[in-house]
Every structure is written in structure tokens, then in C-alpha cells.
Amino acid sequence: MAVYWVNYDLNKSGQDYTKLIDYLKSHPKWAKPLKSSVFVKSSLTVGALRDEIKKYIDTNDDVVVVKVDGQSWATYGLSDTLNEWLKDNL
């Protein structure tokens, strides 16, 4: 399984993120480091994950899905729990 970093902007004012976040949290492992980003561990390809995400957003929304190799990363201000997740999964 690969880890992907999903970043999103739901561009319509007052839009509900619940269904999108619930979908992202349905993956075997996930972490939410920032307001509009989630790391997910998935057996899907990057394109397949993007296509699944499109089911939960509008056509005017934006999404970026990046496969993370974990070779180099740094954080600031994140919880110890999140940093441990990154150490364990990247």
C-alpha cells in the first residue's frame, strides 16, 4: 500500500466537508495534519484515489493527490501523535 497526501479546497461558500472526510478516513490508515489535507494509506493508484474523491466534491472544487515516498519530510507545530503516524507510515 502507498501513502498519498490529499489536499483539497471546496470552493463553494458553506460547503460541507463531512462526506469527503468520512471517505478519506475510511482507508486503512489516515492522518489529518492540516485543515484541508489528509494522508491516507491505500491500495488504490493515485488516479483511482482522485477519481473516488471526485464523487464527494463538486466540479468547481480543487483536489491534489500526491504519492508520498517518505524519504524526506519535516514538520512544525504538529502533535506528537501525528509525527509518530508519519514516522510509522512514511
Image (cartoon, rainbow, N blue to C red):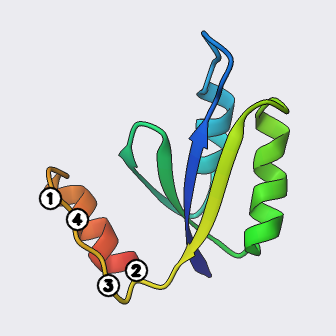
Name the kind of residue labelled 2 in the image: Leu
Q: Split into 4 quadrants, where in the image is the N terminus?
A: bottom right
Which x, y percent locates residue 33? 35, 50
Which x, y percent locates residue 26? 63, 50
| Residue shown at the point (77%, 36%) measured from the top left | 56
Label 4 crowding class (10 Å Cα cut-off): few <14, some 14-19, many 20+?
Answer: some
Secondary structure type for disc 3: loop
Q: Report the residue marked by disc 2.
A: 90
Can residue 25 be seen here? The reply is no
Secondary structure type for disc 1: helix
* Alpha carbon distance from label 4 to label 2: 10 Å
Between 18 and 65, the one lying in front of the other is 65
Can residue 67 be seen here? The reply is yes
* Alpha carbon distance from label 4 to label 3: 13 Å
* Alpha carbon distance from label 2 to label 1: 15 Å
Label 4 or label 3, whichever lies nearer to me, is 3
Label 2 crowding class (10 Å Cα cut-off): few <14, some 14-19, many 20+?
Answer: some
Secondary structure type for disc 2: loop
Residue farthest to the bottom?
71
Label 3 crowding class (10 Å Cα cut-off): few <14, some 14-19, many 20+?
Answer: few
* Alpha carbon distance from label 3 to label 1: 18 Å
Q: Which tag, 4 or 3, sits closer to the chain's start?
A: 3
Q: Split into 4 quadrants, where in the image is the C terminus?
A: bottom left
Q: Which tag, 2 or 3, sits closer to the chain's start?
A: 3
**43, above or below 22, in the image:** below
Proximity of marks 4 and 1: CB atoms separated by less than 8 Å: yes
Number of the label disc, if any, that sits on residue 80: 1
Label 1 crowding class (10 Å Cα cut-off): few <14, some 14-19, many 20+?
Answer: few
| Residue shown at the point (76%, 75%) measured from the top left | 45
**21, above or below 90, in the image:** above
Number of numbered discs: 4
Q: Report the residue marked by disc 4.
A: 83
